[in-house]
Amino acid sequence: MAARQLRSIVYYSNLDLFTALKASWRDTMCAYMAPDPPTSEDLPEVCGEIMMEYAKEIMNLGELLFELLSEALGLYTDHLKDMDCSKSLVCSASTIHLVLSLTLL
């Protein structure tokens, strides 16, 4: 397993290379997008902009869901948000590179 960490980003490649019957050719990147998001220069050019937009929208959705959950539990609307339940977010992206001519079947 190869892993490289750059601030709040972790990159994995070939997670099961020595345990699987076949190589998976899979790359996975995890980025801690909240509370301290990476800079746009830290994210890959191919997906950085969309990850930042996705994180923003998911954080908005998370805050709304915590408000609804607070109300459903009979608490004040901001109770769970005040406990910082909506302060963190980890985004994960995986790609599968399948090249049949290069894979031993």
Image (cartoon, rainbow, N blue to C red):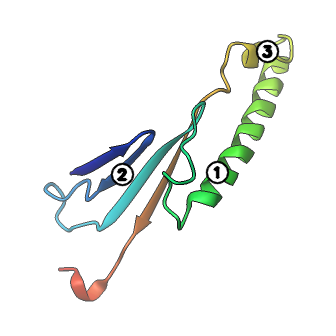
Q: Residue at x 72, y 35 (%)?
A: 62
Which comes sooner in the sequence, label 3 or label 2? Answer: 2
Q: Residues within 10 Å of mark 1 (few under 14, many from 20)?
A: some
Q: Nearer the viewer, mark 3 or mark 2?
A: 2
The tag on residue 11 is: 2
Q: Where in the figure is residue 83, as x and y percent of width and height? A: 69, 13
Quarter containing the C terminus: bottom left
Q: Where in the figure is residue 42, as x and y percent of width and height? A: 48, 51
* Mark 1 to mark 2 CA distance (whole Å): 17 Å
**Is residue 53 depicted above or below 7 in this figure?**
below
Q: Amino acid at mark 1?
A: Met
Q: Amino acid at mark 2?
A: Tyr
Q: Residue at x 34, y 64 (%)?
A: 26
Residue situated furthest bottom in the rendering: 101
| Quadrant of the rendered image containing residue 71 | top right
The answer to whether mark 3 and mark 2 are in CB contact below 8 A is no
Q: Where in the figure is residue 7, as x and y percent of width and height? A: 42, 39
Q: Which residue is mark 3?
A: 73
**Is residue 36 depicted above or below 1 in this figure?**
above
Which comes sooner in the sequence, label 1 or label 2? Answer: 2
Q: Which residue is mark 1?
A: 52
* Mark 3 to mark 1 CA distance (whole Å): 31 Å
Q: Residue at x 39, y 55 (%)?
A: 28
* Mark 3 to mark 2 CA distance (whole Å): 38 Å
| Quadrant of the rendered image containing residue 80 | top right
Which comes sooner in the sequence, label 3 or label 1? Answer: 1
Q: Residues within 10 Å of mark 3 (few under 14, many from 20)?
A: few
Q: Where in the figure is residue 68, as x and y percent of width and height? A: 83, 27
